Image (cartoon, grey):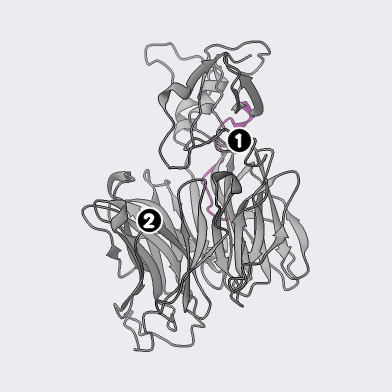
């Protein structure tokens, strides 16, 4: 940052505007695609907002969730409710889940205690054939498991210790609760279309796998479970309409790809993969016809729409270098993506999806007041490799001061570890450092290169950071 005692230089970049540029992220669409919810710091702190996708439909409204810092949100299958994941004071050690009606009324906390955390899981799918009264009370048709009223959501809560975590299905209208799992730290990823099974992710970092858990207490079925750390695993997954599990996985392969697993036989088949990159994100439509894919190609994002049955891919041009979320509305009428670039703060874009799967152009929907000031002065990063004095090879995104070609002061710090990751994005720290007489080389030790697992910096099999001895300072040459 500029020293307050320095005389202002007319050639200096607009530091304050860069540091306070507002952003929007974590979008979700209402079932029919007419509303979009997202997290934004436009009010000064991260809060939940909802607005019509059509600009003529009205302004954005902030959802009432107290003073908590919001992380994520999700529309219910019938569009009546929105769940919001938030944290008091913005801390990561305490989180809780709020429930708000889509019109912004009847806000209340449904998970989260004084100690421990609460995690927001998926809603149970519904045909929305049953109805609820305007005050949100149930008509009695929901049983807390089948989701027939579109009001059942998966929640996970923990106590003082992670092993005290429990996952349940909560009917937010009737209050009925149905247990899913207890004890082992896990994440509920999806509930099957018939409401009888949960798809759960379990395992330590680098050895994660999926487990199909019958809600009636029957035998659990592990999927894509690695025997060794080098075997790969699965990071995300959803159920298809027929019970097939679609997963983002590098099990038995070098790069993350979209695979389909038969939970009865365990047979794995490739659905979509690339030789020049790996799958970062995906979203499967409720009817199983379409999958929206975000690929990591040399560190830059590319988005494609996949016809799952035909295997046909359609490129979706995106206006950002890094995409951090993709979604398809439940009625398959609209897609939404969020992302950022060095000169574009995080934002939300949406497009119509035609009957034949043809996507229209992406249009910005969070409607910022203005773009980034002096965006042409923001430096575009380049992916570089540096070698330490003991031969360790690290890669990172180099932001070099404008007009420089040789070594740039000061030296840049690179730290190896499984928690670290840098992207060619709109980091508020990299903009000022690259525009002044200094360079920065944030590390990309968590494979934001799209080059597969074996070419990444080795990580431990646990979620703990690597020892401090792996931290090294190398010259930026």
Q: Nearer the viewer, residue 57 or 215?
A: 215
* Quarter of the view holding residue 135: bottom left
What residue did someone put label 1 on? 456
Residue 165 appears left or right of 115: right
Taking the magenta stretch, the answer to whether it contains residue 370 is yes
Q: Is residue 151 above or below residue 133?
A: above
> For residue 185, which numbered disc appears in the image?
2
Q: Nearer the viewer, residue 441 or 368?
A: 441
> For residue 6, which numbered disc appears in the image?
none
Q: Which element type, helix, strand or loop, lies under badge 2?
A: loop
Neighbor class of circle 2 (other Cα within 10 Å; few <14, some 14-19, many 20+) is many
How far, Cα to Cα, is label 2 from label 1? 26 Å
Q: Residue at x 71, y 60 (%)?
A: 270
Image quadrant holding the N terminus, namely top left
Q: Is residue 45 above or below residue 219?
A: above
- The answer to whether residue 354 shows anywhere in this view is yes
Q: Position of residue 424 (x, y in %)?
A: 60, 35
* Quarter of the view holding residue 454: top right
């Amino acid at each position: 940052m500029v020293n307050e005692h320095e005389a202002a230089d007319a050639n200096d970049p607009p530091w304050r505007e860069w540091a306070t540029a507002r952003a929007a992220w974590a979008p979700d669409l209402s079932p029919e695609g007419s509303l979009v919810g997202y997290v934004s710091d436009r009010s000064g702190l991260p809060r939940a907002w909802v607005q019509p996708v059509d600009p003529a439909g009205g302004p954005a409204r902030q959802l009432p969730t107290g003073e908590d810092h919001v992380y994520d949100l999700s529309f219910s299958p019938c569009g009546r409710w929105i769940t919001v994941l938030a944290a008091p004071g913005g801390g990561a050690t305490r989180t809780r889940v709020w429930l708000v009606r889509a019109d912004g009324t009847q806000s209340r906390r449904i998970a989260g205690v004084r100690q421990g955390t609460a995690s927001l899981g998926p809603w149970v799918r519904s045909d929305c054939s049953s109805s609820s009264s305007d005050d949100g009370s149930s008509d009695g048709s929901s049983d807390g498991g089948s989701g027939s009223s579109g009001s059942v959501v998966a929640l996970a809560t923990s106590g003082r210790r992670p092993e005290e975590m429990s996952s349940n299905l909560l009917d937010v209208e009737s209050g009925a609760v149905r247990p899913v799992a207890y004890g082992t730290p896990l994440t509920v990823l999806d509930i099957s279309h018939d409401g009888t099974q949960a798809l759960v992710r379990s395992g330590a970092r680098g050895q994660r796998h999926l487990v199909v858990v019958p809600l009636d207490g029957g035998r659990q079925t592990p999927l894509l479970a690695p025997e060794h750390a080098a075997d790969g695993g699965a990071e995300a997954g959803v159920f298809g309409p027929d019970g097939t599990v679609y997963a983002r996985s590098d099990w038995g392969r070098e790069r993350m790809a979209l695979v389909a697993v038969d939970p009865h036989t365990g047979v794995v088949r490739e659905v979509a993969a690339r030789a020049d990159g790996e799958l970062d994100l995906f979203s499967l439509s409720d009817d199983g016809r379409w999958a929206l894919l975000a690929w990591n190609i040399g560190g830059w994002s590319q988005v494609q729409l996949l016809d799952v049955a035909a295997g046909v891919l359609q490129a979706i041009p995106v206006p950002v270098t890094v995409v951090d979320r993709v979604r398809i509305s439940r009625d398959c009428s609209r897609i939404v993506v969020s992302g950022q670039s060095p000169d574009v703060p995080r934002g939300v874009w949406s497009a119509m999806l035609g009957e034949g799967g043809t996507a229209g152009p992406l249009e910005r929907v969070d409607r910022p007041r203005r773009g980034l000031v002096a965006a042409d002065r923001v430096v575009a990063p380049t992916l570089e490799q540096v070698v330490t004095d003991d031969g360790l090879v690290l890669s990172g995104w180099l932001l070099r001061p404008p007009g420089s070609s040789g070594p740039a002061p000061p030296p840049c710090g690179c730290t190896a570890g499984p928690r670290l990751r840098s992207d060619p994005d709109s980091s508020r720290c990299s903009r000022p450092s690259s525009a002044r007489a200094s360079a920065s080389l944030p590390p990309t030790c968590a494979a934001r290169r799209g080059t597969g697992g074996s070419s990444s910096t080795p990580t431990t099999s646990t979620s703990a950071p690597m020892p401090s001895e792996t931290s090294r300072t190398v010259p930026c040459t």
